[in-house]
Image (spheres, grey):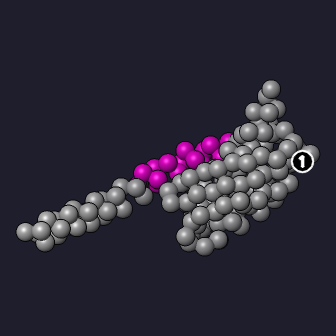
Amino acid sequence: MRFNKALIVIVIALIALVALGKILPAAVESAFPGIRRSTAAFNLATVADGTYEGTAFILPVSVRVRTTVSGGRVSSIELLRHFNGQGTPAEAIIHRIIDGQSLGVDVIAGATYSSLAILKAVENALSRGADVQDN
């Protein structure tokens, strides 16, 4: 009898994991257009010179950055944490941001989640600098 209960619990857990695996990616995908609009529309000219930290979490990617603005330009972006489990190809987006002086850059093909998380973390950091300039 105990074996049957354990088997039922295992089957239910597997079904729940499969369902979660189907639902979560769809939920994250639906957020992509909003993230892209938000980052692309961010106005770097509103950011005061300084160094700012920001974070972003887009399942399953977690990012923390330190962004430095000097002379009204993004001069450096340092990845303090980039948890993704897939490697580091998206980190090339940092050079695109600095070179283009914009968060409206193309994401790295094959590393969409990480690219968007990095963009969102940089936006989060720079928004702290925009708040400083507003005061």
Furthest-left residue in this view: 1
The answer to whether residue 19 is magenta is: no
Res 62 quadrant in image: bottom right
What span is in magenta? 26-41
x, y (%) of residue 25?
42, 58
Whole-percent x, y for residue 51 in the image: 82, 47
Please state which of residues 11 and 4 is positioned toward the viewer in this rendering: 4
Q: Residue at x 61, y 51 (%)?
A: 56
The chief SS type of the magenta part is helix
Q: Is residue 100 at all visible to an observer of this figure?
A: no
Residue at 80%, 26% in the rendered image:
135
Q: What SS does tag 1 mark?
A: strand
Amino acid type at mark 1: Ser
Give coordinates of residue 125: x percent, y percent: 72, 46
**Residue highlighted by disc 1:** 70
Identity of the residue furthest to the top in this view: 135
Pick whichever, 98 or 51, lies toward us.
51
Residue that appears at 64% across and 63% down: 82
Q: Residue at x 71, y 54 (%)?
A: 65
How busy is the neighbourhood of tag 1: few (under 14 within 10 Å), some, or many (20 plus)? few
